Image: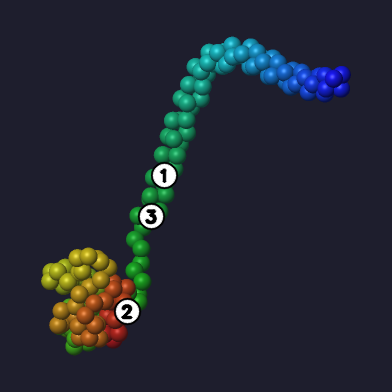
Amino acid sequence: MATAKKAVKKPAAKKAPAKKKPAAKKVAAKKVAAKKPAVKKVAVKKPAAKKVAAKKPAAKKVAAKKAPAKKAKATTARKPNAAFMKPLTPSAALAAVVGANPLPRTDVTKKVWDYIKKHKLQDSVNRRNINADDKLKAVFGGKKTVSMFEMTKLISGHLK
């Protein structure tokens, strides 16, 4: 029986150091509690932080002064790209939609979109698709439905 008692005592000895660890945590918790008044002192320093915030709008004023200088440069007239502004004559099929007069590519695109919107040819479910009528079918190479991106490619084939 003596051996059995020794075996029981050894685990009890192992549990004792485990109890010391929570005690150390309590001491650490007390140290944290002691530091809380220091946080209150930081709260007293908040008016100094407001002074820093007051300085920030002054920096914004400086940035506002620089912004008009950039706008002055941006207001200079941009030169249009000559390739877009060059008048091109539409084919007979495209002339039925936009007219027979030579037009720049940008105007041709605008007039085709005006035609699409006027005749409500844009697909109601998938707005990227155009449902062609008889005039546009000739421009689109006989296709009933064409995407917006494919449309520009097909129109460029009808400009000379």
Distance of label 1 from label 3 (alpha carbons): 11 Å
For marks 1 and 3, the one nearer the N-term is: 1
* Kind of residue sitting beneath label 2: Lys
At label 3, counting other C-alpha atoms closer than 10 Å, the crowd grade (few under 14, some 14-19, many 20 or more) is: few
Quickly name the residue at label 3.
74
Q: Residue at x 30, y 84 (%)?
A: 157
For marks 1 and 2, the one nearer the N-term is: 1
The answer to which image quadrant residue 159 occupies is: bottom left
The residue most toward the left is 119
Tag shown at residue 153? 2
55 or 23, which lies in front? Answer: 23
16 or 113, which lies in front? Answer: 16
At label 2, counting other C-alpha atoms closer than 10 Å, the crowd grade (few under 14, some 14-19, many 20 or more) is: few
Tag shown at residue 67? 1
Q: Position of residue 45 (x, y in %)?
A: 54, 16
| Residue 118 visible, this angle | yes
Vertical placement of residue 56 versus 39, above or below: below
Marks 1 & 2, CB-CB < 8 Å contact: no
Give SS at disc 3: helix
The residue most toward the front is 1
Marks 2 & 3, CB-CB < 8 Å contact: no
| Residue 6 visible, this angle | no
Question: What is the tally of numbered marks visible in this picture?
Answer: 3
